[in-house]
């Protein structure tokens, strides 16, 4: 508990020890993901403190690295999983089956087969997102706990591409959910919960949509009755820009409690909030070119290591870790990666202490949806993941790994 009391609710890129990061880049080479597992633990614990009566699960898709899963499990969170692979990794990392939920989204047959098979030994919760998913689960003789995902008709998020609550592809339409729940029970299944998710990266005005989702889902929970939990999703935002205010977690918790009006237990499942500010991506500068428009800073990380700027125009802070950075003139920089696509940019029009070749750059908020979304595009092996303490967590891929699966 002590380290939580001492923990600030926001950690900026500037708060990381630059010399330590440079040393890790020297030891493990770049690009490199660095994870502060103590920070993961703090973030998880802060959530439990803010939502003392709720079932708090971690959305594994944000970062499924074993070290993260074990840390989150030790802190006392459950695991919300979006695929059979995530369910497996959560169980392998020691989450008790009762704390594992699988939230199906148009689940491939292979996922259902695997999860139903795992459910014979682990009392996990399987969440169905449509009438058809329910039928496919019923066909497989599933005998475990079921939950119904509802489309709440209200969404929010940092970008339209991650705003799920009002997108038609997620969940049973709100006005048909009660009927499906009744049928699930009539046919003898153990319905234990309802689920909805507004979207990802919710802050500011988006929090009103989150509260509305909580109201709608708890009203449905009262109507359906006799449920163990009502899960209102994840989505808590983290500050991206230096001037962004931190998320007031206590205020979010209070608003959630106020909107929640149901006998069942409240359940939440944040991913980003737990891991985003616990990770940085380290890259090395490869070329610096003055152009009339901007200073182009080439580096060895890009869209294959951190897809978010290319996919969502996401803002990630960049810091030049050179010891003399404070003495350098400021340049407006385009930080670009090694892929021949205009999308391969980490930051645009960014004022930075003018970088030089072989500087180490740190990219912030790289704990969530960074390694998870990394690819081998361009035949680029994925980087290693290490802890801030210097423990290797995931080894760097080699060129041999690129062809490992070919016949
Ligand atoms: N629950 C469900 C059912 C979800 O689909 C998600 C995320 C979460 C919880 C956790 O949301 P979080 O607390 O992490 O915001 N790749 C995107 C984010 C996609 C999120 C998808 N679903 C990004 O990098 O911004």
Image (cartoon, rainbow, N blue to C red):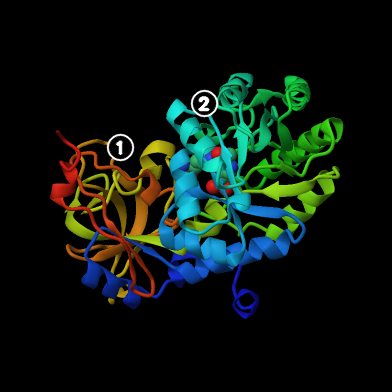
Q: In which quarter of the image is the C terminus?
A: top left
Q: How crowded is mark 2: few (under 14 residues within 10 Å), some or many (20 or more)?
A: some
Tell which of 227 and 375 is nearer to you. Answer: 227
Q: Which quadrant of the view contains residue 7?
A: bottom right
Label 1: how many Cα within 10 Å (few below 14, some 14–19, many 20+): some
- Relative height, residue 304 to residue 68 (above, below): above
Q: Is mark 1 within 8 Å of ligand 1?
A: no
In the image, is residue 302 above or below residue 180?
below
Looking at the figure, which quarter contains the N terminus? bottom right
Please name the residue shown 49% across and 65% down the image: 12
Give me the residue at 38% from left, 44% from top. Answer: 373
Q: Residue at x 26, y 68 (%)?
A: 25
Residue beneath the point at 34% across and 76% down: 20
Which circle's residue, 1 or 2, is located before the other in the chain? Answer: 2
Left-right relation of 102 to 181: left
Displayed quadrant of residue 96: bottom right
Asked if residue 110 shows in the view, the reply is yes
In the rendered structure, find residue 343 and report the number of the disc placed on it: 1
Residue 345, given in percent of the width and then of the height, sits at 30, 44
Q: Is residue 138 left or right of residue 260?
A: left
Labels 1, 2: front one: 2
Q: Is residue 9 left or right of residue 91?
A: right
Foreground pick, 256 / 77: 77
**x, y percentage for residue 59?**
55, 48
Give x and y (percent) for residue 124: 60, 45
Q: Position of residue 391 (x, y in %)?
A: 34, 71
- Residue 106 is labelled as 2
- Is 314 in front, or is 32? 32
- In-front residue for pair 281/65: 65
Q: What element carries label 1?
A: loop
How many angstroms separate mark 1 from mark 2 (CA)?
29 Å
Q: Is mark 2 on a helix, strand or loop?
A: loop
């Amino acid at each position: 508990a002590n380290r939580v009391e001492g923990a600030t609710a926001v950690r900026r890129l500037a708060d990381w020890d630059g010399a330590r990061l440079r040393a890790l880049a020297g030891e493990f080479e770049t690009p490199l993901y660095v994870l502060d597992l103590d920070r993961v633990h703090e973030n998880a614990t802060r959530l439990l403190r803010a939502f003392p009566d709720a079932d708090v699960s971690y959305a594994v898709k944000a970062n499924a690295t074993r070290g993260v899963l074990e840390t989150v499990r030790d802190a006392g969170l459950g695991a919300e999983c979006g695929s059979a692979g995530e369910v497996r990794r959560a169980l392998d990392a020691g989450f008790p089956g009762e704390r594992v939920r699988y939230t199906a989204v148009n689940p491939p047959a292979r996922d259902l087969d695997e999860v139903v098979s795992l459910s014979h030994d682990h009392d996990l919760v399987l969440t169905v997102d449509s009438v058809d998913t329910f039928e496919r689960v019923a066909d497989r003789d599933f005998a475990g706990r079921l939950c119904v995902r509802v489309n709440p008709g209200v969404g929010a998020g940092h970008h339209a591409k991650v705003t799920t609550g009002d997108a038609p592809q997620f969940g049973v339409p709100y006005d048909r959910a009660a009927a499906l729940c009744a049928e699930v029970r009539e046919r003898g299944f153990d319905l234990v919960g309802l689920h909805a998710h507004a979207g990802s990266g919710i802050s500011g005005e988006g929090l009103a949509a989150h509260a509305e989702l909580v109201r709608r889902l708890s009203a449905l929970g009262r109507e359906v009755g006799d449920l163990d939990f009502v899960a209102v999703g994840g989505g808590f935002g983290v500050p991206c820009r230096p001037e962004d205010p931190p998320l007031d977690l206590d205020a979010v918790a209070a608003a959630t409690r106020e909107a929640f009006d149901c006998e069942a237990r409240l359940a939440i499942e944040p991913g980003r909030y737990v891991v985003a500010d616990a990770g940085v991506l380290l890259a090395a500068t490869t070329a610096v070119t003055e152009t009339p428009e901007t200073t182009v800073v080439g580096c060895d990380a890009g869209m294959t290591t951190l897809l978010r700027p290319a996919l969502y125009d996401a803002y990630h802070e960049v810091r030049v870790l050179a010891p003399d950075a404070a003495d350098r003139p400021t340049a407006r920089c385009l930080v670009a990666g090694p892929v021949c696509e205009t999308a391969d940019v980490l930051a645009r029009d960014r004022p930075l202490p003018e970088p030089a070749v072989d500087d180490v750059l740190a990219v912030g908020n790289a704990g969530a949806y960074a390694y998870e979304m990394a690819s081998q595009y361009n035949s680029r092996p994925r980087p290693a993941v290490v802890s801030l303490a210097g423990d290797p967590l995931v080894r760097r891929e080699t060129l041999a790994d690129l062809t490992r699966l070919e016949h």
